[in-house]
Amino acid sequence: MYNGPDKHKETLRNSIRQRHFAIHEQWRKLAAGLGPSAAETFREYERAAQEMTVVSNSAALRVRQLREDDLTPEAGRQRLIAEALAEGGKKRDAARARMRAAREVLAAKARAAALPTLDPKREAAAREELCLLASGTRDPVDVLLELAAGDDELAGVAVSRYGESLLRAKGVHKAPELHRAVEDQAVHAARQSADPKRQAAAAAYAALGELDKGMGVAESLADNALEDEGVELG
């Protein structure tokens, strides 16, 4: 049975709210797995998302009040509406920037935590072994990529600054970019790591796409009140 456009709109919005809740619930757990600092960063993300909704609702209410104000001349009302929307737009932009900043911090934390670590006591020996392995090949990048898939000190030295320096010393073209690929290999391999912290970090890094979707969902929810007032959003 057809229930009309309003019913359809509310059903769609409820679906979006459920999606929003699911993404935040997932990321609260992922951020907690990265440690207290990451958990607080995600709380900042959530506060910014909530702020976007509050700002939008406030702007929508102001627009409604001004449109119902019969005492203010039409030109004055339109000017005040434009000012309210402009001010709301600035606050929305600020909230959006806070969300993006928090997302970048979470990405950096997850990536760093997913990389293999190197025991300082084993660093010298690991460097020496890496040099020996690299000296016997025409493509040291392949050596680093293979080592980065591991879970030991050789993986740790492969993704370290020393690994990149080795590529430079070997005259590898675009050494920084290729070493980034070595790190990518290690992050991907962390999903099967014996270290539960690396596993958790890899899961968080892999779920960044969901967080990106969550930003769009949060903005869509914030748009609802303004759309109800007929405000066209770019």
Image (cartoon, rainbow, N blue to C red):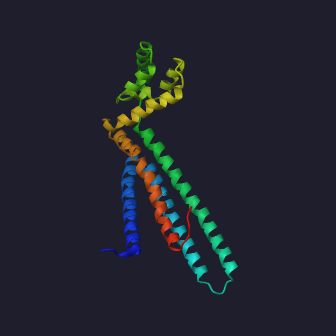
**Within the image, what quadrant is residue 17 found in?**
bottom left
> In this image, 162 relative to 114: left or right?
right
Please name whichever residue, 170 or 151, is drawn nearer the observer in this view of the structure. Answer: 170
Residue at 61 percent across and 69 percent down: it is 85
Residue at 45% in and 31% down = 181
Q: Position of residue 78 (x, y in %)?
A: 66, 75
Estimate the x, y position of residue 91 in percent, counting from the top left. 59, 63
Q: Locate the N terminus and report the quarter of the image it occupies.
A: bottom left
At 61% across and 62% down in the image, what residue appears? 90
Whether residue 75 appears in this view of the structure is yes
Percent from the top left, x then y, of residue 139?
44, 18
Residue furthest out toward the bottom? 71
Q: Point out residue 92 in the picture as x, y percentages from the top left corner.
A: 56, 62
The number of discs equals 0
On-image quarter of the C terminus: bottom right
166 lies above or below 221: above
> Among all residues in the image, which is located at the extreme front?
2
- Residue 19 left/right relative to 164: left
Q: Against 1, is 89 above or below?
A: above
Residue 116 seen in the figure = no
Q: Taking 166 as reference, is 65 left or right?
A: right
Please name whichever residue, 24 or 41, is drawn nearer the observer in this view of the structure.
24
Q: Residue at x 36, y 54 (%)?
A: 26
